[in-house]
């Protein structure tokens, strides 16, 4: 691991960062800490993590960002109309389905927002109706834009309530004329009355149907429905910390659980004997397998399965694992997974978590069943929000 880089980043959070304000902060509710000095935000997060995790071990100082603005590489806008018929796009008001128009957000990628504003402008000339959640009438529900910060590649996902998109070719041409930097456009169909943004079905309207981005020197393909960390600058810090904690020697069998498009496992593969990745999302696993070939990595295998069930299967077959990376969603892991970790007894478990509360719950289980916490590193992945990411190294207690 490049210790120096991480140390520099740690210091970065202590530098003065300009305190900006946002006109829709209160209504949107997404950035709870906006308007507060950045150093104070980091302090609050540090205390929050210490309160929950100090019982398990010492918490290292949080790693902040040098420039904590405009870090999100994924921008989502919901579309609708005002009572007077004006087309608006933005975000839902906190805990409601009322749309708050957003012109510029302080944490989102600005190029992606520009594209969303252009789409709003095109809707009128193409006579495309925005979807109305109450009546179920209308076509365009959401737009999602993802930009590879390293590659510059841009994906636009148009989420429609109906697969029939009149004059789609002309719309795509018009959008590309305005933004030749867009590298792929995808049509996603979501006809359900649901708060989920993306539906199951999708069709590529332009380009390859995915974008690529680079993290720590490896290139990763990302499909519309695959998970990809939203703050790529801090992701590199996070992954370096996690892989550094594992201190691999080249002899280990490593499990990358909840692996998404395979990023952690593929970045660790050159330091391990072999890597097994497991992930529930079929599109993400397809990306992970292609990512292995794309980076000429041959000692990895990816499985499309529930991590708990997969781990139970490994435990039943007594398949030895030396190191487990686990990076579950906010809800944390489950007993099937954790009890199988305890049965298989890997020497190290590196837990990457975006929710310290479920992390504390899962640490309680593991520390009550033969593991001890060695290190806890909070990282500011979601600047200006109340959320915080942590990496925890655990090792098996020798009897
Ligand atoms: C926080 S993301 C981490 C992904 C990846 N490690 C990364 O850094 O990009 C959590 C991932 O867990 C996957 N997931 C959710 N529930 C799962 C389950 N029961 N079994 C396996 N994977 C699951 C999600 O699809 C998502 O890709």
Image (cartoon, grey):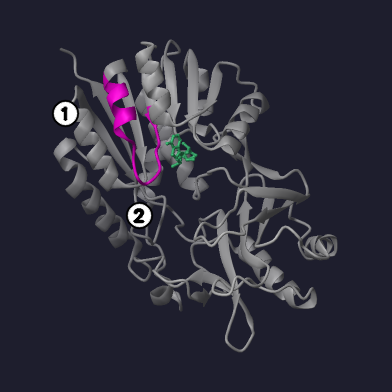
Which corner quadrant of the image does residue 187 belong to?
A: bottom right
Kindly report the distance in space between the C-alpha atoms of the residues bearing marks 1 and 2: 26 Å
Q: Is residue 154 above or below residue 124?
A: above
- The stretch in magenta equals 325-342
Q: Is residue 45 above or below residue 312?
A: below
Residue 301's spot in the image, x, y percent? 55, 20
Classify mark 1: helix, strand or loop: loop
Residue 364's spot in the image, x, y percent? 19, 35
- Would residue 172 appear left or right of 102 to someone viewing this image? right
Which corner quadrant of the image does residue 90 belong to?
A: bottom right
Query: Counting other residues with Cα less than 10 Å from the Cα at mark 1, is it few (<14), some (14-19), or many (20 or more)?
Result: few
- Residue matched to label 2: 387
Q: Quadrant of the C terminus?
A: top left
Question: In the image shown, does 233 or 199 lie closer to the viewer?
Answer: 199
Q: Nearer the viewer, mark 1 or mark 2?
A: 1
Q: Say if disc 1 is inside 8 Å of ligand 1.
A: no
Q: Quadrant of the N terminus?
A: top left
Question: In the image shown, does 371 or 23 lie closer to the viewer?
Answer: 371
- Would residue 131 appear left or right of 355 to someone viewing this image? right
Question: In the image shown, does 63 or 77 lie closer to the viewer?
Answer: 77
> Do tag 1 and tag 2 residues touch (Cβ < 8 Å)?
no
- Residue matched to label 1: 368
Which corner quadrant of the image does residue 33 belong to?
A: bottom left
Residue 132's spot in the image, x, y percent? 59, 73
* x 51%, y 74%: residue: 99
* x 23%, y 29%: residue: 366
Q: Earlier in the sequence, mark 1 or mark 2?
A: 1
Is residue 340 rendered magenta in the image?
A: yes
């Amino acid at each position: 691991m490049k210790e120096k880089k991480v140390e520099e980043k740690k210091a970065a959070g202590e530098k003065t960062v300009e305190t900006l304000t946002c006109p829709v902060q209160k209504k949107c509710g997404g950035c709870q800490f906006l308007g507060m000095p950045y150093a104070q935000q980091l302090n609050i997060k540090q205390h929050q993590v210490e309160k929950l995790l100090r019982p398990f071990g010492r918490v290292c100082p949080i790693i902040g960002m040098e420039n904590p603005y405009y870090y999100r590489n994924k921008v989502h806008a919901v579309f609708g109309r005002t009572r007077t018929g004006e087309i608006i796009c933005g975000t839902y008001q906190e805990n409601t389905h009322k749309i708050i128009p957003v012109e510029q957000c302080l944490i989102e990628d600005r190029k992606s927002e520009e594209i969303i504003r252009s789409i709003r402008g095109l809707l009128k000339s193409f006579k495309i109706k925005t979807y109305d959640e109450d009546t179920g009438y209308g076509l365009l529900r959401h737009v999602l834009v993802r930009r590879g910060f390293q590659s510059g590649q841009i994906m636009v996902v148009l989420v429609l309530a109906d697969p029939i998109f009149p004059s789609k070719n002309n719309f795509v041409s018009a959008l590309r004329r305005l933004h030749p930097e867009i590298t792929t456009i995808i049509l996603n169909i979501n006809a359900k009355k649901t708060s989920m943004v993306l539906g199951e079905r999708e069709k590529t309207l332009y380009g390859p149907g995915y974008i690529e981005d680079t993290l720590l020197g490896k290139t990763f393909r990302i499909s519309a429905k695959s998970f990809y960390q939203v703050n790529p600058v801090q992701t590199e810090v996070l992954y370096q910390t996690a892989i550094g904690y594992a201190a691999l020697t080249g002899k280990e069998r490593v499990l990358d659980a909840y692996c998404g498009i395979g990023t952690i496992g593929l970045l660790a593969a050159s330091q391990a004997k072999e890597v097994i990745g497991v992930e529930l999302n079929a599109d993400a696993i397809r990306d992970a397998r292609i990512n292995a070939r794309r980076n000429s990595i041959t000692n990895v295998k990816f499985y499309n399965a529930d991590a708990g069930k997969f781990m139970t299967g490994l435990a039943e077959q007594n398949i030895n694992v030396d190191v487990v990376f686990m990076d579950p969603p906010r809800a944390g892991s489950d007993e099937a997974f954790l009890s199988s970790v305890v049965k298989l007894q890997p020497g190290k478990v590196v837990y990457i978590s975006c929710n310290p509360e479920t992390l504390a719950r899962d640490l309680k289980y593991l520390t009550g069943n033969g593991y001890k916490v060695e290190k806890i590193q909070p990282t500011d992945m979601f600047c200006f929000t109340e959320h915080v990411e942590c990496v925890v190294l655990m090792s098996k207690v020798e009897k």
